[in-house]
Image (spheres, grey):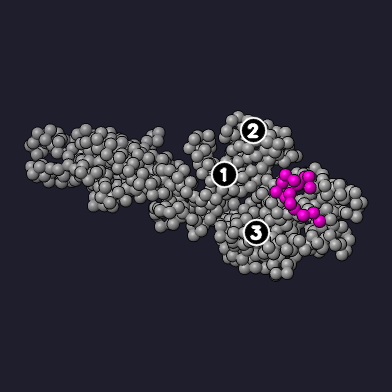
Amino acid sequence: MIVGTAGHIDHGKTTLIKALTGVNTDRLKEEQARGISIELGYAYTPLPNGEVLGFIDVPGHERLVHTMVAGASGIDFALLVIAADDGVMPQTREHLEILQWLGISTGAVALTKTDRADAARMTEVTSEIRELLAATKLADAPVFAVAAHHAQDAGTAALQQHLHEAAQHMSPRRDDGLFRLAIDRVFTLAGHGTVVTGTVFSGQVQLGDHLALMPAGDTVRVRSLHVQNRPAASGHAGQRCALNLTGIDKDAIKRGDWLAAPSAMTASTRMDVELQLSAHAGVLLRNRSPLHVHLGTLHQVAQVALLDGNTMMPGSRSRVQLLFESPVCAIPGDRFIVRNAQANMTIGGGHVLDPLAPARKRRAPERQAWLDAMQLMLDGAGVSALLQAASPGGMRLSMLMQLSGLPATALQLPEGAQSIAVNSQEQDNFVMLPAQWQSLRTLAVTALTDFHARFPDEQGVDAARLRRMALPALDNALWQAVIGSLTSDAMIQRSGPWLHLPQHAVSLSDSEQVLAQQLLPALAAAGFDPPWVRELAQAHKIPEEQVRQLLRKLLQQGLVYQIERDLFYHHDRVRELAALLAGLATEVNTGATAGVNAARWRDATGLGRKRAIQILEFFDRIGYTRRVRDAHVLRDGAWPGWHGSAESG
């Protein structure tokens, strides 16, 4: 269990910790000289069951609230310290409010300096404390009257016994999540190198683990670690850990960073949250209002983008988007507090809904439905609502892991949920409900049916163009999986690059087959400069229209491609041209324009400028490339069969 102090400056927090543990948490010379805490202090004491009780001592000065929040973000038990002579003071109230925003519901009150107050004053302050706590989650917290300066103080002993019993009866945090540790201190230790300390928010860490320093994304390795101030082989959720890291310098790390499993977090400058303003905040929020946000051990300024209405009144609750100055990391459910623009008053708090919020369409109904699903997941309803809201394509397993904070082995997927593999990496799989998968297949078949109805004389359409017709925003790897499943089930067929329905076919008469056996070799032998229809008709002494009609049928069968109205290329030559174009487009030439321009293509093919441009425009037309100013660049998801031989299709 981690105990965190809270309370006004000079109310005896550090003295009390020393009485409970024997450790003076004021380690800095300035702290000892001035008699006040400036930085976070740490102390540990053994428990009868062999475990260790940890303490985080926080500063009480109003200007150091940001440091107090960094310490309080990972505690299990709040020790609210109130001096009997002063009673409840401004930082007492603010610290208590911060504890509430952070969701800390277990604690005790230490009424200190009782040797400076008579019985009447003690009764008065105790009544004041009960009134203060009445509307909070600590309403039933016990109050211990202590005089920590005095040796053998009965009140201090009673408080110590209570803390020990609470620690031994507290249920351990779930540690099967993805590892995350909020860094609150970083330093260099002679002979060891870089060391970071913090509280493990979730998961566990082992010696030798490779972790990500977020939001930077640098990879580090755990050389050694201490848990609750003792050497250990592993650390678990809820424990204080000090990790000796290799692969990084101390100056690259700061308070507010996270150490996390490589797949646990993604950095972003936008997150959608649910925010509650204090009734006495005295602040009216508008779009672009600045706030000081404290999340984990992070402190950063963010601007507010309201997701409902144009203002947010004190005492109200609303969804907002926080726009940060630099990338931050969080997962859904993480709690935070906000202070006003002057950073001199805590005005509210809340929890994260989506740590990877979009910049556009923040208020769209689909977006609100997604945030509703996120809240349902946080309320314990599982990931079904998330998958449903992620229509039409479900979600990648990696994203589902990040949003739930759980590895794949701990995720409880809905009954019947399907995992669609798109490559060899399991985390890249798409997870979706059965109805979603069937919907994707149906949309693909419907789009292909519509294409045949509109263009009955064409053999079919390539996969990339069909995706743009049916679901242009769908991930291409998932779309290829959909097409693969449909072809496997014989619901659609592939002829060369063309997809078509099984019943959609073009047949040749006996005479046409004989003529095709003459024309196809002639087109193949002509290479990149085949004869026009008129020239083919003259060479074989047959009418132009007869040649034209046959070539159109061969086009539908995928055996030729039509570059211009009466100009047809053999399919093997077009594949060669496509491979040549792909090679040119991906060459690394310093200063070269991305893609291929007409002059470069003309030189590569040995054709005239006009014919070279006609071929480039053909590739644009069928969706293999797209024109960007004067260059032609390969489209994402262009049919890979272009790069193979004729038989590969």
Q: Residue 106: which numbered mark, if any?
A: none
Of pointers 3 and 1, the one earlier in the residue sequence:
3
User: In the rendered image, which residue does mark 2 sit on?
Assistant: 312
Nearest the viewer among 230 and 623 is 230
The residue stretch that appears in magenta: 130-144
- Residue 591: x and y, percent? 45, 42
Q: Amino acid at mark 1?
A: Leu
Residue at the spot 64% in from the left edge and 54% down from the top edge: 182
Q: Which residue is mark 3?
A: 238
Q: Residue at x 77, y 52 (%)?
A: 80
Dot 2 or dot 3: first in sequence order is 3
Q: Which callout, 2 or 1, points at the residue further toward the start of the chain? A: 2
Q: Amino acid at mark 2?
A: Met
Looking at the rendering, which quadrant does residue 353 occupy? top right
Q: Is residue 224 left or right of residue 19?
A: left
Helix, strand or loop for disc 1: strand
Question: What residue is shown with label 1?
Answer: 353
C-alpha gap between disc 3 and disc 1 = 22 Å
Quarter of the image holding residue 560?
Answer: top left
555 shown above or below 144: above
Quadrant occupied by the N terminus = bottom right
Tell me if mark 2 has few (under 14), some (14-19) or many (20+) residues whose alpha carbon lies within 10 angstroms of its own: many
Rendered location of residue 314, percent (x, y): 68, 34
Task: Please name whichever residue, 600 or 274, is drawn nearer the observer in this view of the structure.
Answer: 274
Residue 138 magenta: yes
Q: CA distance from mark 2 to mark 1?
A: 18 Å
Identify the secondary structure beneath mark 2. strand
Q: Is residue 544 left or right of residue 35?
A: left
* Marks 2 and 1 in Cβ contact (< 8 Å): no
Could you tell me which secondary element the residue under label 3 belongs to? loop
Per the picture, the main secondary structure of the magenta-coloured stretch is: loop
The spot of residue 125 in percent (x, y) is: 85, 48
